[in-house]
Image: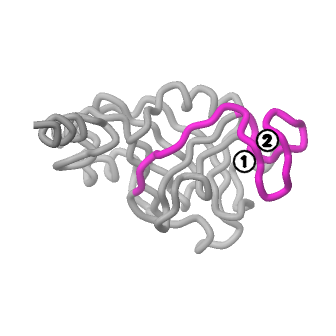
Amino acid sequence: MKLFVLWTFLVASPLFPLGPNPLPGDPFIIVNKSTNQLAFIDNGKIEAIYPVGTGKRADLTPEGMFTVTVKAINPYYRKKNIPGGAPLNPLGSRWIGFDALETNGRIYGIHGTNRPDSVGYYVSEGCIRLRNEDVEELFDKVPLGTKVYITRSNKSFEEIAKEKKAIPLK
């Protein structure tokens, strides 16, 4: 009986998605490395498009479907031992980590920056940079379990979202 209750809880949990994912209407993020833009989709509509910075080389920002596993306010920058909220912290004010390349959401993420002038360019070591005000807005809308699709495409966000079933086909 206890095992059944645990299984039922996990199946109902957004951290244990079953079936098609994203489910229609779920929050969904698309990052297009060709345009250095991020689209946030909710309830089947593109709610916002933000400029982003991506990898210095095309191979640095991984492509594919990933899941948001970690969120942090004023994230600590482990590589250089810089506390969260410090002016020199390159992660900015928010971290939305996802499980790219079998990592745990602490290696690859969507984050703010202390260099807002770098947004829109190919500048990162693999993460996706947003201006702090944009990542703060996005952070509040993105629950754990949100799918993040990263691609290099000439298609519109609407076309990509329809292919991934984040927007209903018309």
Amino acid carrying label 1: it is Val
Numbered mark located on residue 119 in the image: 1
Left or right for 160, reference 21: right
Q: Is residue 85 magenta?
A: yes
Taking the spot 69% from the left edge, 28% from the top edge, the residue there is 133
Q: Is residue 71 magenta?
A: yes
Q: What type of secondary structure mainly makes up the magenta span?
A: loop
Taking the spot 55% from the left edge, 60% from the top edge, the residue there is 33
Left or right for 60, reference 121: left
Tell me the magenta residue range.
66-93
> Which quadrant of the figure contains the N terminus?
top left
Q: Secondary structure at mark 2?
A: helix
Say if 64 sits above or below 112 in the image.
below
Say if 46 sits above or below 169 in the image.
above
Taking the spot 41% from the left edge, 50% from the top edge, the residue there is 67
* Dot 2 alpha-carbon crowd within 10 angstroms: few under 14, some 14 to 19, many 20 or more: some
Residue assigned mark 2: 116
Q: Secondary structure at mark 1?
A: loop
Which is more toward the observer, 88 or 77? Answer: 77
